[in-house]
Amino acid sequence: MANIAKTLAGRVHNVIQVAAKNPQLAPRFYSAAANLEFIKTEVTGEKKNVAVITLNRPKALNALCNGLMKELSTALDSFEKDKGIAAIVITGSEKAFAAGADIKEMQPNTYSQCIMGNFLNDWTRVARCQKPIIAAVNGYALGGGCELAMMCDIIYAGDKAKFAQPEIALGTIPGAGGTQRLTRVVGKSKAMEICLTGNMINAEEAEKMGLVSKVIPADKLVGEAVKLGEKIGSHSGLIVQLCKEAVNTAYETTLQEGLKFERRTFHATFSTEDRKEGMTAFVEKRPAKFSNL
């Protein structure tokens, strides 16, 4: 037994040394080794460059508890640092993407606890990720689940998906962006109707109002989201990040400020090797070979 333990310890030591010498490998190692209770992770796609994070609390319809959100943040930390990952997909089950925040966990909270603990402040990791994130929403995306989807950059919905902000029926209001992101996406009147009634909208309605980009049969949803991630991954990762930042700036600032930011970012791309390679490849009528430089 002592020899076996010594051998295993040696192997672990070797893996850690390899990860230390090759930082790009470390996130994959730690992600795979993590003892995850509330999510599942995998790397997929033809080039193995799309990460899929699956919310995994089936008995609670993937209700968002603190433990789940911490695991999600940790996974995003790993995939964001992994140079081999071009895009990230977040999904749930066919029954529920996430049926809201965990009410049983939240119910005992007091006003002072919320203020002193800055409750929900650390639930915004998805919105701060530099890499593109695609929400693949099947089933219920209610309350915090709808807010989580809106933190992502693109939402694909299964044909049976349902969206809602039902907090009003619980004597509270959305607290993770429901009143803010929804208003910016669908406009004041629709956002008011959704938030003040708590009524659910289906995938077709969500697509019409611009909340989701595309509606897809439930059994093909994740596959299509991965394909989208692969398409994004075929471009320069450096330029993708700059483009994402520019779109987010439009979402958060005035038109004039956004136009100035866009123009300066466009100018900045002319200092990159990938801009030079992309235009040269176009002129030479060949595929571009981007280096993220």
Image (cartoon, rainbow, N blue to C red):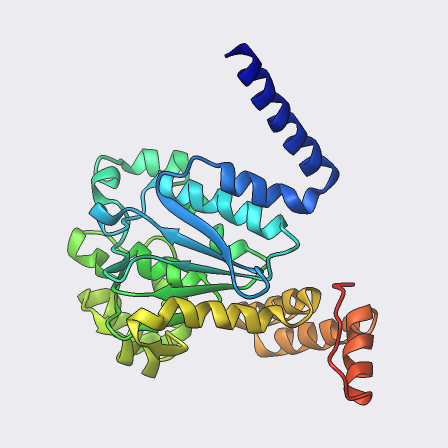
- Please tell me which residue lies in front, 37 or 132: 37
Residue at x 18%, y 68% (from the top left corner)? 199
Circle count: 0
Furthest residue in direction top, as rendered: 2
Residue at x 48%, y 45% (from the top left corner)? 73
> Is 74 left or right of 289, judged from the image as shown?
left
Image x and y of residue 4, in percent:
54, 17
- Please tell me in which quadrant of the rendered image residue 276 appears: bottom right
Residue at x 67%, y 65% (from the top left corner)? 237
- Please tell me in which quadrant of the rendered image residue 176 appears: bottom left
Quadrant of the rendering where the C terminus is positioned: bottom right
Evaluate whether residue 251 shows in this view: yes
Image position of 278 with respect to 35: above or below: below
Image x and y of residue 153, in percent:
49, 66
Residue at x 63%, y 78% (from the top left corner)? 256
Evaluate whether residue 154 shows in this view: no
Image position of 62 with respect to 3: above or below: below
Furthest residue in direction left, as rendered: 169
> Is 190 left or right of 51, judged from the image as shown?
left
> Is 177 left or right of 280, judged from the image as shown?
left
- Please tell me which residue lies in front, 251 or 132: 132
Image position of 112 with respect to 166: above or below: above
Image x and y of residue 96, in percent:
26, 59
Image x and y of residue 17, in percent:
70, 31
